[in-house]
């Protein structure tokens, strides 16, 4: 498949995901004048976040990592631990789903239900990415895209609500939209699974200088091949040449747990951003 066709497929699948999540929201989300992704912005109740709003800050328990290869539940934090904002400036996350809560359940039951609902939303994102790479992963790779999801139920009251938000992997502040990148644009800088590429090799933020980015982990019983790894990287980056003209190298690595499909920098330069959805734009490289 050519890069253009791959990009078109990614765009269509991403649009489908946004529609799936948005159309799955209760009609009350529109009736109450909330900002729903893809709709016109209208006046809404101050303090009630909607899809398309952002998380400016999180003051509470750190949500667990949500890698695609593990079934980790979304974290739950109280409304008072989250600062919601527009997405004009830098933020740590984005609201991806909203629902009105039924009156009656106690706080514990509401929090549990919100967490399960947000976990289901997270699963939708994971399945979308698996679907996106299915043709090239060939039963060999699981895409290594690390996300955090958090459910935020409102304070008790007759007009209760819950939102589900996706957060940057290390709670880094970023600009742009991860949700939009699922359809037709590059992912914001922090999103991805990046490694130092130096001894000792360790996980680092994709927004910090790093030498490698992981794109896939080997599925149980599968045999890794360099060709399948290259195809996976090409699909997830949308780069016509995943080597960036020889400045990057696609290869296999064998950490303690399982083989991985990685891209590493050739030479002394370092990456300072994710390669997800980059296309043929400038590589985020700086001198080492």
Image (cartoon, rainbow, N blue to C red):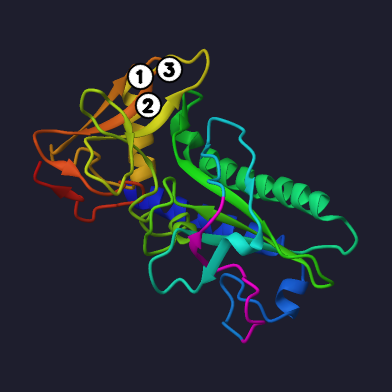
The answer to which of marks 1 and 3 sits earlier in the sequence is 1
In the depicted view, which residue is nearer to us: 215 or 1?
215
Residue at 41%, 46% (x, y): give it. Answer: 170
Q: Is residue 126 above or below residue 93?
A: above
Q: Residue 42 appears in which quarter of the rendering? A: bottom right
Q: Which mark is residue 258?
A: 3
Is residue 199 among the parts visible in the rendering?
yes
Q: Which mark is residue 228?
A: 2
SS category of the residue bearing label 3 = loop
The answer to which of marks 2 and 3 sits earlier in the sequence is 2
SS category of the residue bearing label 2 = helix
Q: Which mark is residue 225?
A: 1
Where residue 22 appears, as percent x and y from the top left, is: 65, 63
Q: Real-space Cα distance between discs 1 and 3? A: 14 Å
Q: Residues within 10 Å of mark 1 (few under 14, many from 20)?
A: few
Where residue 39 appears, as percent x and y from the top left, is: 59, 77
SS category of the residue bearing label 1 = loop
**In which quadrant will I find the C terminus?**
top left
Residue 48 magenta-highlighted: yes
Region of the chain picked out in magenta, as a range: 43-60
């Amino acid at each position: 498949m050519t890069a253009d066709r791959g990009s078109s497929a990614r765009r269509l699948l991403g649009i489908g995901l946004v529609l799936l999540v948005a159309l799955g929201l209760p009609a009350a989300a529109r009736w109450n004048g909330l900002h729903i992704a893809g709709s016109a912005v209208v006046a809404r109740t101050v303090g009630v976040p909607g899809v398309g709003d952002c998380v400016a800050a999180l003051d509470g328990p750190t949500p667990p990592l949500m890698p695609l290869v593990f079934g980790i539940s979304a974290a739950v934090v109280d409304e008072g631990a989250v600062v919601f904002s527009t997405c004009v400036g830098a933020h740590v996350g984005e609201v991806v789903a909203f629902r009105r809560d039924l009156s009656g359940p106690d706080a514990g039951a509401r929090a549990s239900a919100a967490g399960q609902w947000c976990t289901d939303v997270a699963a939708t994102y994971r399945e979308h990415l698996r679907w996106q790479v299915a043709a090239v992963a060939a039963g060999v790779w699981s895409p290594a895209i690390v996300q955090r999801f958090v459910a935020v139920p409102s304070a008790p009251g007759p007009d209760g609500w819950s939102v589900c938000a996706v957060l940057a992997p290390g709670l880094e502040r970023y600009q742009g939209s991860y949700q939009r990148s699922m359809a037709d644009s590059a992912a914001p800088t922090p999103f991805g699974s990046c490694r130092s590429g130096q001894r000792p090799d360790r996980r680092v933020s994709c927004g910090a200088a790093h030498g490698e980015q992981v794109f896939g982990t080997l599925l149980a019983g599968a045999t890794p091949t360099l060709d399948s790894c290259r195809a996976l990287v090409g699909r997830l980056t949308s780069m016509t040449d995943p080597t960036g003209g020889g400045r990057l190298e696609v290869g296999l690595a064998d950490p303690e747990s399982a083989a991985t499909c990685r891209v590493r920098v050739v030479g002394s330069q370092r990456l300072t951003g994710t390669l997800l959805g980059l296309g043929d734009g400038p590589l985020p490289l700086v001198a080492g």
